[in-house]
Amino acid sequence: MAKILICDDEQGLRAVIKRYAQFDGHEVFEATNGAEAVDINKKAAPDIIIMDIMMPVMDGYSAIREIRKTSDVPVIMLSARGEEYDKILGFELGVDDYIVKPFSSREIMLRISAILRRASKQTTDNDGHIIYQKSGLLIDITAYKVYIDEEQIELSPKLYDILFFLVRNKNIAIPRERMLTEIWGYDYFGDDRTLDTHMKLLRKALGPYADCIKTLRGLGYRFEG
């Protein structure tokens, strides 16, 4: 059982998600705006948050910014719009998934389950740090730290996952489908452009080392190291 926080100003939408979540045995908290979500997150420490974008008092983006100051709780963002700008902004804030309204209850519950499974599988390697270094790029996989020219950079949880996956498979051509399966989960069935958006953000974050990630047209990606 997980604790799920549903934040949306539409009571009907909250009720539908809540009904399905409780049927699966989860504990549900509700918020009608971003400010309430920030407060509930501090008090209840949910395992995952379902966050709408357009809400009164405080919108979803602002709420995520506040929550990310103290928590890495997984977030699924809801939106009535599907523009790439909205997705990029959400992913830059550390959102784990993005769903465009309208959506089916089965779809959102499958995505919730996939994210919760991935979160529960995260472990710490106590046998020593796994480190990759190329010129001024240093990646400490065990410590979840990335340095560029001796300065540490911060990435969203999903970007860390993608980067570490690429490094572990360096110099190997990786099909898009494998990346989606390994990183987002075998039952992920969202827009595969999500991967492209994350790769753009990762290259931007790597700055002078962005060209370590090669796009293989019609196939996927390769990390050259």
Image (tube, rainbow, N blue to C red):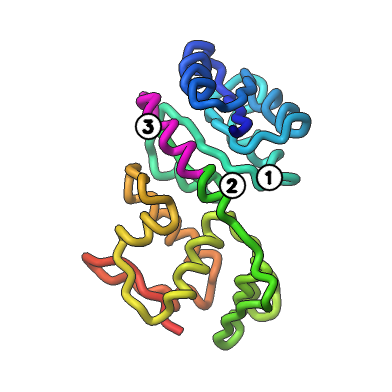
Please give the residue where the numbered disc 3 appears in the rendered image.
107
C-alpha span from label 1 to label 2: 8 Å
User: Residue type at mark 2?
Assistant: Leu
The image shows residue 73, relative to residue 20, as above or below, that is below
Please give the residue where the numbered disc 2 appears in the rendered image.
93
Camera sees residue 86: no
Majority secondary structure of magenta residues: helix
C-alpha span from label 3 to label 2: 23 Å
Asked whether disc 1 touches disc 2, contact meaning CB atoms under 8 Å apart, the reply is: yes
**Mark closer to the chain start, 1 or 2:** 1
SS at mark 1? loop
Judged left or right of residue 210, residue 219 is: left
SS at mark 3? helix
What's the residue at 37%, 32% (across, down)?
A: 107
Judged left or right of residue 60, residue 143 is: right
Which residues make up the magenta segment? 100-115
The image shows residue 198, relative to residue 152, as above or below, that is above
Locate residue 143, reporting x and y percent: 68, 69
User: Residue type at mark 1?
Assistant: Arg
- Quarter occupied by residue 56: top right
